[in-house]
Structure formats: C-alpha cells, structure tokens
Image: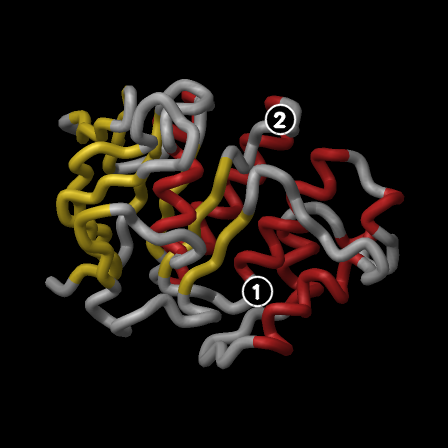
C-alpha cells in the first residue's frame, strides 16, 4: 500500500528555541487512516501538521508525498486550531473558497457540509457574528469542501461543548468513511482518541505510536 505521506528521521528546529520541536520522527500515513496525535501544548503537534501539509520545511530528514510528489491543493485539507476565516466573506463564501482556488476533483457541496455540521442558518453571516465554536465548525467545513485525500485537524473539538463535539466527531467520521479520506487529528479529547484506529504521542519532540 502506497503512503499518502512519509516522514523519515525528520528533525525540526526553530531559531531561538532551546530544544528542537521534532527529533528523529518517522511514520507513514495511509489511505483511510484514522490517527489521533496527542501531546501536551508545545509538544510539536502543530509542527507535525504543518510539515504534513507542506506549510513548513524540515530542518533535517525527509518528508515525502509518494502519491503526488508534493502536497497538492485540494488533496490535503487543514482545519487550523484558530479558525482563520476571511472576515469580509460570509460563512458560505468561506467554505466555498477552497473550491475556487484548488483543482479539487471531488468537490463537496458547501451548503450540505454546513447543514451536516448544524450551521445552515449561519450561511449568510460574517465571521464576526459567530461564536468561537461556530467559527471552528465553519473552518472544518472549509477543510472538508474539496473532499481531500487527507484531512488534518488541529483540536477540532477544542471550543465545543461536549454534546456538539460528539455530533461533530460523528459527522467527521461518517464523512471520512464515505469519502475514503484519511484523518489526522491533533487532540486532547478522549472522545476523539477513542474514535481513531492509530494513536500517536509526542513528548519533547519524540513521536511514538501506541499499540491499539
């Protein structure tokens, strides 16, 4: 089976930091994977996601995307911990934006995604009119819009109450099953961890996989 993403002995240093963010990290992500990425704040979870998405470069080692040769817009979706919505675009326009700037071959329906996430009534609102949890769900819908091969989510339930978080995780799981999308979710939420097949922990830049 060909990996979507391959890390081999990856190290990441940041200028001025007293220790490396990542040390000798090696893994593969395959199609249909469900991976929980766990660790304390500052342990390197966001760094891993940024390297997977091609938003940052490793200091040493190798990051490869064997299926594509490089990360292709539309094939990797990223829902940031901070929603990062475009303030002058409506909710629907924010979700539709990736479809306008990518070469997505399996585009989703923005309004349907918003409905699945319980946001239909907010489609014409601006980001300033949303709560933190609503903005986070809009950002997740935006990441899902291109139906990527791999979706990376940084604490997707972090600003949600328990009931809403459970609903969102259920939607994400069913959507990924239907689309064949692999998921990597950085999280502290036990409910997220319990819904995944593979579990990684980061500690002082070292990544380990916990046996299922």
Q: Residue 159: which quarter of the image?
A: top right
The structure residue drawn at horizontal position 40% and vertical position 40%, both measured from the top left corner, is: 47
* Element type at mark 2: helix
The structure residue drawn at horizontal position 72% and vertical position 43%, both measured from the top left corner, is: 135
Front position among marks 1 and 2? 1
The structure residue drawn at horizontal position 54% and vertical position 31%, both measured from the top left corner, is: 166
Q: Does residue 166 appear left or right of residue 56 in this picture? A: right
- The answer to whether 119 is drawn above or below residue 201 in the figure is below
* Element type at mark 1: loop
Q: Rounded to the nearest whole Å, what is the CA distance between mark 1 and mark 2?
A: 24 Å
Q: Does residue 89 appear left or right of residue 168 in this picture? A: right
Q: Quadrant of the N terminus?
A: bottom left
User: Where is residue 64 drawn, in percent x and y?
Assistant: 22, 61
- The answer to whether 43 is drawn above or below residue 34 in the figure is above
Q: Residue 46: which quarter of the image?
A: top left
Q: Which mark is residue 2?
A: none
User: Where is residue 98 drawn, in percent x and y?
Assistant: 60, 69
How packed mark 1 is, by other alpha carbons closer than 10 Å (few <14, some 14-19, many 20 or more), is many
Q: Does residue 126 appear left or right of residue 140 in this picture? A: right
Q: Nearer the viewer, residue 145 or 64?
A: 64
Q: Which residue is mark 1?
A: 145
Q: Which mark is residue 163?
A: 2
Q: Quadrant of the C terminus?
A: top left
């Amino acid at each position: 089976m060909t990996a979507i993403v391959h890390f081999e002995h990856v190290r990441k240093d940041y200028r001025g930091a007293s220790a490396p963010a990542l040390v000798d990290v090696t893994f593969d992500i395959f199609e249909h994977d469900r991976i929980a990425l766990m660790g304390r704040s500052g342990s390197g979870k966001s760094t891993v996601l940024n390297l997977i998405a091609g938003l940052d470069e490793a200091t040493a080692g190798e990051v490869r995307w064997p299926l594509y040769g490089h990360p292709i817009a539309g094939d990797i979706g990223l829902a940031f911990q901070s929603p990062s919505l475009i303030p002058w675009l409506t909710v629907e326009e924010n979700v539709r934006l990736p479809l306008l700037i990518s070469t997505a071959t399996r585009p989703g329906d923005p309004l349907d995604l918003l409905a699945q996430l319980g946001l239909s009534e907010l489609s014409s609102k601006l980001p300033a009119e949303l709560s933190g949890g609503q903005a986070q769900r809009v950002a997740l819908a935006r990441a899902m819009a291109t139906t990527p091969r791999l979706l990376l989510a940084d604490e997707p339930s972090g600003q949600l109450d328990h009931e809403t978080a459970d609903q969102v995780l259920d939607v994400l799981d069913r959507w990924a099953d239907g689309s064949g999308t692999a998921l990597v979710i950085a999280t502290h939420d036990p409910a997220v961890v319990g819904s995944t097949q593979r579990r990684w922990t980061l500690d002082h830049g070292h990544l380990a996989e916990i046996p299922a």
